[in-house]
Amino acid sequence: MHTPEPGLAQPMALPSTTPPAGSPPLSGLGGFTPESFGVVGFGRMAQALLLPLIDSGQVAPAAVRAVVGTVASAVRLEAQYGLVVATDPAQAWQAPVVLLAVKPQLLAAAAEAAQGIPVPVVRRPLLISVLAGVPLARLQGLFPGHRIVRAVPNTPALVRQGLTGLAWGEGIPAEQQLWVRQLFAQVGEVLDLPESQLDAFLALTSSGPAYVALVAEAMADGAVAAGLPRALALRLAHRTLAGTAALLQEQELHPAQLKDMVASPGGTTIAGLRQLERAGLRSALIEAVVAAAERSRELA
Ligand SMILES: NC(=O)c1ccc[n+]([C@@H]2O[C@H](COP(=O)([O-])OP(=O)(O)OC[C@H]3O[C@@H](n4cnc5c(N)ncnc54)[C@H](OP(=O)(O)O)[C@@H]3O)[C@@H](O)[C@H]2O)c1
């Protein structure tokens, strides 16, 4: 197991949740104003989405009805974030908007828990599912009373640099669509996509941070092997990745253009690139994204 060195690799830093005084339940998001927000599964992804919204005052902590699987994590999360966190699913399923964020393996259990709770026929609740690979058709079969949107977010939402792909189910009114888009826009960029593209989107954007983190760690390891202290190597690796991404985006460069700009004839960079090609880095990354997309389809 990886043991972080003291003061270096920190656990995921979540925002504090001190609510601004008098914040409304779910403010300023479209014309739709649900009075409460159910969260089924308040784990890493739900926290990455909701905590920045709570922190900025967009969602009042009192409006959140979060449900987790175990009393131990309910107690811990209540103490940590000052929210009411329960294990009784009815807490969340009675809300007009529900974020479904359990592991896909727990979908059937979550659906069973929802079944006993009456759903208004006139004002059908909105279900936002972030479950990887679970298609709208299956969700609609399990939650027939809900209107459903599939969302594929990623963890950089924690620092408001997220990406979220949305695929819409049937009959979601325009103001609710706007509300959902604005909700995810608080933590990054939002794209509407055909559902058929969500697996590939997830493979790149949701799994991608793990691949990039691996690259950062490996580059830092290389720098340590070449003589830099560990802390400095990690900081420089992160900065190099962030700076490179910013340069590619801001100057709208194709990656090959940037690579050619940096690699001078007979120089250091081309020596390194030659090694990367020999080791198959490019192919490894291609296959990693394809494998993640295939796994997402398997989960369907
Ligand atoms: N992480 C990502 O980057 C990412 C990206 C896109 C989509 N997703 C999707 O997000 C979903 C959640 O992933 P995650 O990484 O956030 O998982 P996670 O950290 O393991 O969180 C799962 C949460 O579900 C709770 N839970 C377990 N059983 C439950 C039940 N019967 N009823 C209600 N809640 C229950 C858990 O509570 P306990 O801790 O008490 O068991 C925990 O709070 C997955 O479906 C995944 O596909 C994740």
Image (spheres, rainbow, N blue to C red):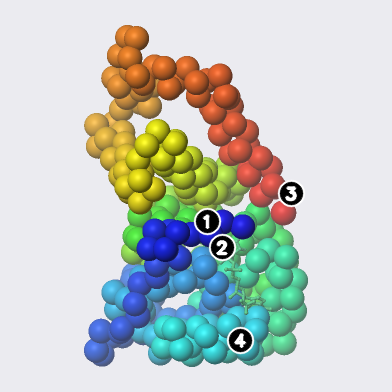
The amino acid beneath tag 1 is Val
Q: Using the image as rendered, state which of residue 28 and residue 247 is in the foreground.
A: 247
Residue to which mark 3 is pinned: 298
Find out whether the residues at labels 4 and 3 contact each other: C-beta distance under 8 Å: no
Residue 273, horizontal then vertical, whole percent = 44, 21
Q: In the shown orientation, is residue 28 left or right of residue 125?
A: left
Circle 1 sits in a helix, a strand or a loop, which is it?
Answer: strand
Nearer-N-terminus badge (4/1): 4
Give the CA separation, mark 2 to mark 4. 24 Å
Please tell me whether residue 222 is drawn above or below residue 203 in the rendered image.
above
Residue to which mark 1 is pinned: 152
Give the CA separation, mark 2 to mark 1. 6 Å
Q: Is residue 256 visible?
A: yes
Residue 72 has which mark?
4
Nearer-N-terminus badge (4/3): 4
Q: Residues within 10 Å of mark 1 (few under 14, many from 20)?
A: many
Please tell me whether residue 241 is drawn above or below residue 251 in the rendered image.
below
Residue 130 has which mark?
2
Find out whether the residues at labels 1 and 3 contact each other: C-beta distance under 8 Å: no
Circle 2 sits in a helix, a strand or a loop, which is it?
Answer: loop
Nearer-N-terminus badge (2/1): 2
Query: Ligand 1 within 8 A of label 4's CB?
Result: yes
Q: In which quadrant is the N terminus drawn?
A: bottom right
The amino acid beneath tag 4 is Ala
Q: Is residue 185 visible?
A: no
User: What's the residue at 66%, 40% (across, down)?
Assistant: 291
Find out whether the residues at labels 2 and 1 contact each other: C-beta distance under 8 Å: yes
The amino acid beneath tag 3 is Glu
User: What's the residue at 34%, 77% (across, down)?
Assistant: 16
Residue 264, horizontal then vertical, whole percent = 30, 14
Query: Ligand 1 within 8 A of label 2's CB?
Result: yes
